Image (cartoon, helix red, strand yellow):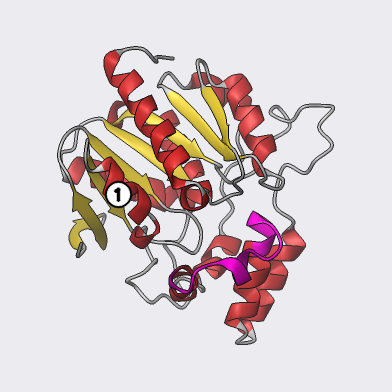
Amino acid sequence: MKPVSCDVNGYRMHYVDSGAGSPVVLIHGSLCDYRYWPLQGKVFSRYHRVLTPSLRHYYPERWDGRGNGFTLEQHAADIAAFIRELDLGPVHLVGHSRGGYLAFQLACEHPELLRSTVLAEPGGDLDGSMQAPDEDEPSQLDPTMISGALKKLREGDVDGGLALFLDTVSGPGTWDRSPEKFRDAARDNAYTLIGQVNDRPRRYTREQAQSIRLPVLLVGGSRSPAPFPQIIRALGSHIPGARTLFIDNATHTMNLEQPDDFNNAVLDYFQDVETGAQHP
């Protein structure tokens, strides 16, 4: 399906809009765009209106990493404005990775716009109030990996930088195993990593997590590397009424690796929310 666009906070945002029913907004993570969700959009749109936007500076824009506007706060403000601009009313918001952290922020700051929130391996860092004292795994991505990936990009080794980033996030060999269509999309968005490295979003706090009064589903991959399981466990222990599940035989991109399991879990959750079976 071809994307359409609308003006959001002075930026032309492109998105795909399909199906009918209660609205679902799918937010991509690092190196991705509205093309990340075909395996969800096709199925979810049988039951819901599904909207998949590209965040500011992601494809179809060809950003070189220069200039302003690439912050998680700006992206969150854009999605809030997007929901209002299209008069969607409260939506089911699904965010993956960096998009999961964005969804968390909207759940804290704009609960009136959301009906439920699905956090699929949200990225970000935990502050001291969220870290378990006996946790021996890192609660954030290795900063040397990120700087190494960025160095390769600046030297012109785009595939090398992307491979380093994705193999760290989803496990060794992820880049080589990925379909060419996925790798092409990552190449289209490669220089957004510059903006991501320069961004310094707030860390998750216990106070924020405990303030959420929306239905929240946390989804992870059973084979995902740190820090994603640690973040899920921390959020799940502090968000009131949160439900947590891990998809078997999957890593960070569980919605692509095990789409049937992911889709069924999320759709079942939406139904529980809409029938009142799930509430915070």
Query: Residue 2 location in percent, x, y?
Result: 19, 65
Question: Residue at coordinates 46% horizontally, 71% vertically from top-left?
Answer: 189
Quarter occupied by residue 111: top left
The mark tally for this picture is: 1
Q: Position of residue 142 (x, y in %)?
A: 74, 56
Mark 1 = which residue?
41
Q: 98 or 47, which is in the foreground?
A: 47
Q: Is residue 213 above or below residue 16?
A: above
User: Residue 43: image x %, image y %?
Assistant: 29, 44
Say whether residue 111 is visible.
no
- 162 or 256, nearer to the observer: 256
- Residue 226 can be seen, yes or no: yes
Above/below status of 27 relative to 155: above
Residue shown at 60%/28% (left/top)?
Answer: 235
Residue at the far bottom in the pictured view: 156
The three-letter amino acid code for the residue at tag 1 is Gly
Which of the 4 quarters of the picture holds residue 248?
top right
Q: In the figure, is residue 91 to the left or right of 59?
A: left
Crowding around mark 1 (Cα neighbors within 10 Å: few <14, some 14 to 19, many 20+) is many
Q: Quadrant of the C terminus?
A: top left
- Name the magenta segment's main secondary structure: helix
- Can you give x and y, in whole percent of width and height, for residue 153 in the image? 61, 79
Asked whether 246 falls inside the magenta stretch, the response is no
- Residue at image point 53% right, 35% down: 219
Range of magenta residues = 167-181
User: Where's the N terminus, which quadrant?
Assistant: bottom left
Left or right: 221 with respect to 181? right
* Residue at disc 1, secondary structure: helix
Res. 277 image quadrant:
top left
Q: Nearer the viewer, residue 233 or 65?
A: 233
Judge whether residue 171 is colored magenta.
yes
